[in-house]
Amino acid sequence: MASYHVRSNSLPSRQHPAIPEFNEQLCRLRASEATSSSASTSINCKLSGLQHLFDCLERSLLLPLNQQALSQEQHQKWIDQILDGSLRFLDICNIAKDSLLQTKESTQELQSTIRRKRGGNIELSSEVKKFLTSRKVVKKAIQKAVEQLKCIENNTFKKDNETIAIVSMLREVQGITLAIFESLLSFISGEKSKSKLGGWSFISSIMHHNRVEEESQLNDFSRVEAALKFLMSPKMKKSDSFAVENAQNQLENLELCIQDLQEGVENLFRRLIKTRVSLLNILSH
């Protein structure tokens, strides 16, 4: 996707400082999406960078000429599509929040069992099965969110040379938001995202889990699942305390990872609401 530059008669001749800042932040986010990473810090940086991009967009929306342009009737169809997309993003945020909370609660319950029993057969096995079952439920919810992303892509990203600059900015924001949500959902599902901007190959990855993965490709979620499956494996000896300790360490790491992701998703959720409200206010005047 080409770099975005604002050139429009709808904007003042002297660029507002938010415009070059917007372009710079957009380029950074695109670069981060082009670089695949299984680290939770990478996802958190993307979420934080996306919030910064929304801040730049918000300042651009305050410009009187932009507000005037957005309120014109001939641009209504584009604004309606953007508003529809923003509503779907809020739904996806809620799915992500629920998925993280459900996994966090299962993680804490399993940690408690391990601390009490240190691998005590029946109860531990039961809790591990509950955790893995919970993860299957989470992945089904993520598939629903994936379909939401497909709808946003299909409804919003048909190019039009006549689109005014501020609408182009809004659509660029939705495009990078879609890509980052793709990375987030892939991460929570325990899969490594294989797609680039605007790509959808990761859907088959989520729906058909590739069980042969290098350790370096696993993230915090998939490491826990791998450790627990090994713990329940017939090959694992009852006296193998290392496997139990490894599973406990991975669960502790996952809980910290989830806490960071929850904060990032919640902050982004509030940012999405703020931008949506700003657009609705502009249209109501």
Image (cartoon, rainbow, N blue to C red):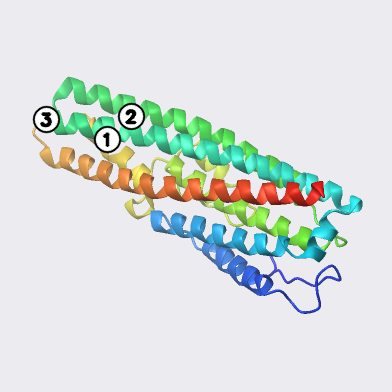
Residue at the spot of label 1: 228
The residue tagged with tag 3: helix, strand or loop? loop
- The percent position of residue 64, horizontal first and vertical second, equals 79, 64
Who's the residue at 58% across and 51% down the image? 271
The residue tagged with tag 2: helix, strand or loop? helix
* On screen, residue 102 above or below 168: above
To which quarter of the image does residue 5 belong? bottom right
- State which mark lies toward you, 2 or 3: 2
Q: Earlier in the sequence, mark 3 or mark 1?
A: 1
- The percent position of residue 137, horizontal first and vertical second, equals 45, 28
CB under 8 Å between callouts 2 and 1?
yes
Q: Residues within 10 Å of mark 1 (few under 14, many from 20)?
A: many
Q: Which mark is residue 238?
A: 3
Who's the residue at 68% across and 47% down the image? 277
- The percent position of residue 276, horizontal first and vertical second, equals 68, 47
Q: Which mark is residue 131?
A: 2
Q: Amino acid at mark 3?
A: Lys
